[in-house]
Every structure is written in structure tokens, then in C-alpha cells.
Amino acid sequence: MSLREIIILPDRQLRLVSKPVEKVTPDIRQLVDDMFQTMYDAPGIGLAAIQIAQPLRVITMDLAKPDANGEGKREPRVFINPEIIAKSDELSVYEEGCLSIPEYYEEVERPARVRVRFTDIDGVVREEDAEGLYATCIQHEIDHLNGVLFIDYLSKLKRDRVMKKFTKAAKRAGE
Ligand code: GNR
Ligand code: NI
């Protein structure tokens, strides 16, 4: 396992559309292991492969609350080639954050419940109903696979402000 660097705004790779995984190979399992290590270290509740610069349709997630050591009982989930096949008309608002947009949080409105179809780590196609934080998180992660970020749902004013802040920070870091 290895800890990988999480790419942040304004890295243009975040706008790539990730490619489907054709087969769950040892390389994909290695990628998933690295994603879990990176996600737990961050710490975050979800991670899309593109956030470690791999444009593949792979997501890791763990919605369990960590204990004081940042560990506790884990509930790791893996989604390969996930698709939303149904969504509720009812919406819900959640304050979102993103490891690729550090320390910025805003409320986003999304369908409250979704049904997701995905391939699991054993290569088996499965479907699950998601609600609450699970629904919010899977939608946020699937957006990453399509080059979409939660700031895209905010006003242009807010989005421009965030982009400017991170562009400036990147320039300063590069000088
Ligand atoms: O760690 C994360 N927390 C979070 C909180 C609310 C809504 C979505 C998320 S996902 C985020 C990790 C991340 O950036 N995943 O892409
Ligand atoms: Ni994110």
C-alpha cells in the first residue's frame, strides 16, 4: 500500500472524464488499496481515483465515524463503474467539502435518495439504495468521475472566488 498525493484545484486533471474499468485486475486492487490509505490518512469519507491522478471510474468510501485515533470500526466500500439508475424527486441539502478543495465548505442541494449500480471489488455487479450522507457522498464522487466538482452547483460569484483563491495559492507555491 502507498499513500498518494491528492491533487487540488486548479489542477485541470480534476476536469477529466474518467474511463470505465474493463476488469478488476491486481492493478485495480492495488489502486483501491492506495485510495483507502490516502482517504483514511486525509481524512475523508470518500475518494475518486482522479483525485490521485488516475482517470478511472473507481471510488472508495467509508461513512463510519472514526474514533479518537482516527480508526475505530471501518466500513470500507468500493464502487467500480458506478451509475445512478434512479433518483428521488425529493431533494436534501448537505454542507459539502472536497479533499481537492481543502477547507472550503458550502451547502449543496441534491436528490435525497438514489439507486446506484456498480461493480464491486470481486467483479460482481450490484445495486444499492442510498439515502442521507451515503446518497450525498456517492453523488459527489460520481460527479468527480465526470469532471464535475461541488462548486459547480454554487453561484458563479462564489465559484469564481474559490477558483481565484486556489489559483493564487498555486502561483505562490510555485514561485
Ligand atoms: O471527505 C469528504 N467529505 C464530504 C462531506 C460532504 C459531502 C461530500 C464529501 S466527500 C469528501 C471527500 C472528497 O472530496 N471526495 O471526493
Ligand atoms: Ni471531492
Image (cartoon, rainbow, N blue to C red):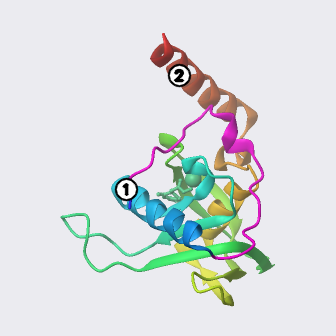
| Placement of 18 over or under 92, stated as above or below | above
Residue at the disc numbered 2: 170
Q: Position of residue 161 (x, y in %)?
A: 63, 27
Q: Quadrant of the N terminus?
A: bottom left
| Farthest-out residue, left | 68
CB of mark 1 near ligand 1 (< 8 Å): yes
Q: Position of residue 50 (x, y in %)?
A: 62, 51
Residue in view at x 76 percent, y 66 percent = 20
Task: Look at the image and give the residue range highlighted in magenta.
Answer: 3-24
Q: Is residue 136 magenta?
A: no
Type of amino acid at the residue the image marks with label 2: Ala
Residues at discs 1 and 2 in contact (Cβ within 8 Å): no
Q: Which mark is residue 173?
A: none
Residue in view at x 25 percent, y 75 percent = 72
Q: Is residue 8 magenta?
A: yes
Q: Is residue 98 something one can see in this rendering?
A: yes
Q: Is residue 115 something one can see in this rendering?
A: no
Q: Position of residue 160 (x, y in %)?
A: 69, 28
Q: Secondary structure at mark 2?
A: helix
Name the one closer to the observer, 32 or 102.
32
Where residue 43 sits, quadrant-wise, is bottom left
**Dot 1 alpha-carbon crowd within 10 angstroms: few under 14, some 14 to 19, many 20 or more:** few
Q: Which mark is residue 43?
A: 1
